[in-house]
Amino acid sequence: MTTITCVQGDITEQHVDAIVNAANSSLLGGSGVDGAIHRKGGPDILTACRALRAAHYGKGLPTGQAVATPAGRLPARWVIHTVGPVFRISHGGDESLLASCYRESLRVADELGAKTVAFPAISTGVYRWPMEDAARIAVETVRQTETRVEEVCFVLFDERAYEAFAAQVR
Ligand code: AR6
């Protein structure tokens, strides 16, 4: 059984085995949580991302997939980078791709042997996914995924996001 919790806070400060990054397919950084992780984690994360790109993802990491790097100066051991879908009403929101981010990140966490994993609210910033819907998909998917991860903590940056996730976790 995986314990699911949520807190309001900054994911870069979490003392867990792995934190998940809401990245983009370039793996070269961006704004939002991605920017904060690279800024606070230091250049080793970008070096590892560049190596992954060169070896496996010349065309970019596809949406819904996940890969891990070390976490540089962050308190976590690993960063699992995943690419969320951009929200588009015409695509029914591509719900399966958002669910895939959570499932694939947990699969990578299992490969690493990570027991504690922190997730941000993937796709709810620059990628514009409505918060309540994103929270439902996130929590449902983690509940339905078989994993050896013992604790999943959703780390929400603001109160509105925290309330949306807390309503699903309760
Ligand atoms: N800790 C926890 N959550 C955070 C933090 C933080 N330090 N900073 C922001 N958030 P976003 P996306 C929340 O835009 O929508 C980047 O440029 C934020 O309030 O970071 O998946 C990437 O490179 C929001 O609720 O990710 C991609 O190009 C959530 O994290 C693109 O943005 C996700 O917002 C990805 O967009």
Image: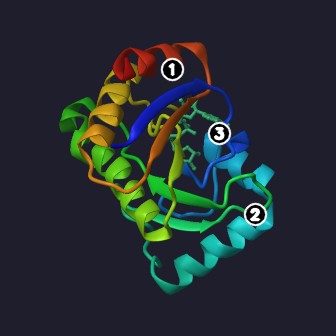
Are dots 2 and 1 in contact, CB under 8 Å?
Answer: no
Cα–Cα gap, marks 2 and 1 = 27 Å
Q: Amino acid at mark 1?
A: Ala
The reply to whether the residue tagged 3 has its Cβ within 8 angstroms of ligand 1 is: yes
Front residue (pair 54, 107): 107
**Location of mark 3 (residue):** 11
**Location of mark 2 (residue):** 72
Q: Amino acid at mark 3?
A: Ile
Whether 166 is drawn above or below 83: the answer is above
Front residue (pair 155, 87): 155
* Quadrant housing residue 77: bottom right
Upstream in sequence: badge 2 or badge 3: 3
The reply to whether the residue tagged 1 has its Cβ within 8 angstroms of ligand 1 is: yes
Q: Residue at x 44, y 53 (%)?
A: 83
Instruction: Characterize the local packing of mark 3: few (<14), some (14-19) or many (20 or more) Cα atoms within 10 angstroms.
Output: many
Cα–Cα gap, marks 2 and 3 = 14 Å
Q: Secondary structure at mark 1?
A: helix
Whether 110 is drawn above or below 85: the answer is below
